[in-house]
Image: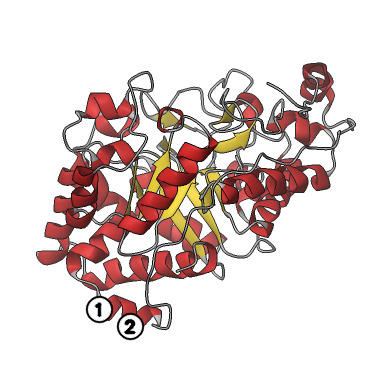
């Protein structure tokens, strides 16, 4: 990669794991290369949220709940092709995909590495998606810094890079995390993104956990909270919606929820003193929380995944921990093995909405999940008032971050 890029040295990690936080010097980051600017979707911005809801059809409201890979808009692809990271990805909007977007008017898009070829392409692709959508989209990506960075780690991009969140946390300086968020937010905004699935707010308390590992800012809850909050504010400075993940905490689990249900056996009191702390960020303002597919018997005796649990999402997260905060709750991917092994696409989508989630991320089958939610509202399984609650919240976040 050409140009000067910032890297924290891996050698800083050893003393962090043994003794806690230690300061490390940080070099100046470079400015991302210019790329074409996407245009926002058109819409009547003079309408109130209530007026927008009144004008939306049931299908339009249901659509707002879904955030999908762009590949899901190509109905000729199988689910295996959509999920396969090594398969060719969709990199531009086709006429067929435009028609799918009319029939299944989703509220958001999550781009992956296989959907990205170069700066000009992804900026143009995001702009095409916005222009084709009747309601402004939330367009997101996993850009944490470190090992999970779809853009910065792509060979076609010349962007600042970070060794890991843990190395940033090792500085003990929240300003470094804020600058990281600001830098990432600046190039995400330049390429047409409005949301980031970052920061990782997990506390890495289980050294055998390689799913999170150095993606977390710290093994200490207070440090993780300070750093995650600072990174979120940096993202917000560039008008990018931050997402704290993975509630109720993935840092103590041993399992990988990509392939099966992860478990945490800590008591609620233990989690209150550690895992929950980084997710409570009153100074951040409007932010998103991603709920993981984690079973926590102390929080829900049924051992349902947290993402589908009313006890976890509504009673704990919304009502107990963040009763006065405006948060957007998004599920982790509903195509993960932790969900698909136990639930159909329709069951997972309906139960996630019943649990209190707003955005339903990447169901195993968009068409099945969409139709199931629509039918559940029509037959009263899900009151339309419950649907309207999430749609109104999604629209408010789009006003704040996506130019609705």
Q: How many marks?
A: 2
Q: Are marks 2 and 1 in contact (CB under 8 Å)?
A: yes
Which is nearer the eye, 94 or 229? 94
Nearer-the-camera pick, 17 or 186 = 186
Tell me how far mark 2 sits from mark 1, CA to CA: 6 Å
Q: According to the image, label 1 marks what residue?
A: 55
| Residue at x 22%, y 37% (from the top left corner) | 343
Looking at the figure, which quarter contains the N terminus? top right
- Secondary structure of the residue carrying numbered label 1: helix
Q: How is the image coloured?
A: secondary structure
Numbered tag placed on residue 91 in the rendering? none
Determine which quarter of the picture holds residue 389.
bottom left
Q: Position of residue 227 (x, y in %)?
A: 73, 44
- Percent position of residue 379, x then y: 9, 64
Q: Residues within 10 Å of mark 2 (few under 14, many from 20)?
A: few
Q: Residues within 10 Å of mark 1 (few under 14, many from 20)?
A: few
307 left or right, relative to 187: left
At horizontal 57% and vertical 64% (from top left) the residue drawn is: 286
**Residue 365 placement: quadrant:** top left
293 relative to 231, above or below: above
- Residue 373 x, y percent position in the rendering: 19, 55
Instruction: Say if residue 205 shows up in the picture.
Output: no
Could you tell me which residue is drawn at 59 percent across and 49 percent down?
190
Q: Is residue 295 left or right of residue 20?
A: left
* Horizontal arrangement in the rendering, residue 86 relative to residue 275 (left or right): left
Tell me residue 101's x, y (percent): 24, 52
As helix, strand or loop, the secondary structure at mark 2 comes to helix
Mark drawn on residue 51: 2
Q: Quadrant of the C terminus?
A: bottom left
- Please say whether residue 378 is visible from this viewpoint: yes
């Amino acid at each position: 990669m050409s140009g000067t890029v910032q890297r924290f040295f891996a050698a800083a990690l050893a003393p962090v794991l043994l003794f806690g936080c230690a300061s490390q010097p940080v070099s100046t980051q470079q400015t991302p290369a210019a790329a074409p600017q996407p245009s926002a979707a058109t819409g009547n911005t003079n309408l109130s949220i209530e007026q927008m809801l009144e004008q939306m059809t049931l299908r339009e409201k249901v659509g707002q709940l879904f955030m999908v890979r762009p590949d899901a808009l190509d109905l000729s692809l199988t689910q295996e092709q959509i999920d396969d990271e090594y398969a060719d990805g969709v990199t531009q909007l086709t006429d067929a995909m435009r028609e799918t977007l009319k029939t299944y008017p989703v509220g958001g898009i999550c781009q992956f590495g296989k959907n990205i070829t170069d700066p000009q392409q992804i900026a143009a692709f995001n702009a095409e998606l916005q222009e084709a959508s009747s309601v402004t989209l939330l367009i997101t990506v996993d850009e944490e810094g470190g090992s999970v960075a779809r853009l910065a780690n792509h060979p076609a991009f010349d962007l600042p890079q970070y060794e890991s969140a843990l190395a940033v946390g090792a500085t003990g300086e929240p300003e470094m995390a804020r600058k990281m968020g600001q830098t990432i937010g600046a190039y995400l905004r330049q390429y047409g993104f409005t949301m980031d699935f970052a920061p990782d707010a997990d506390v890495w308390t289980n050294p055998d956990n390689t799913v999170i590992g150095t993606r977390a800012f710290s093994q200490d809850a207070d440090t993780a909270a300070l750093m995650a909050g600072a990174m979120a504010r940096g993202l917000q400075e560039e008008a990018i919606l931050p997402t704290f993940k993975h509630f109720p905490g993935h840092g103590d689990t041993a399992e990988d929820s990509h392939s099966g249900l992860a478990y945490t056996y800590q008591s609620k009191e233990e989690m209150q003193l550690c895992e929950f702390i980084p997710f409570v960020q009153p100074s951040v303002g409007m932010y998103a929380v991603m709920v993981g597919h984690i079973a926590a018997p102390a929080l829900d005796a049924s051992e349902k995944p947290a993402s589908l649990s009313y006890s976890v999402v509504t009673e704990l997260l919304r009502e107990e921990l963040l009763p006065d905060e405006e948060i957007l709750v998004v599920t982790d991917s509903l195509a993960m093995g932790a969900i698909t092994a136990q639930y159909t696409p329709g069951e997972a989508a309906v139960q996630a909405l019943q649990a209190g989630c707003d955005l339903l991320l990447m169901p195993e089958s968009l068409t099945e999940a969409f139709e199931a939610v629509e039918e559940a509202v029509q037959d009263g399984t899900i009151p339309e008032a419950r649907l309207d609650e999430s749609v109104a919240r999604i629209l408010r976040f789009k006003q704040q971050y996506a130019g609705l």
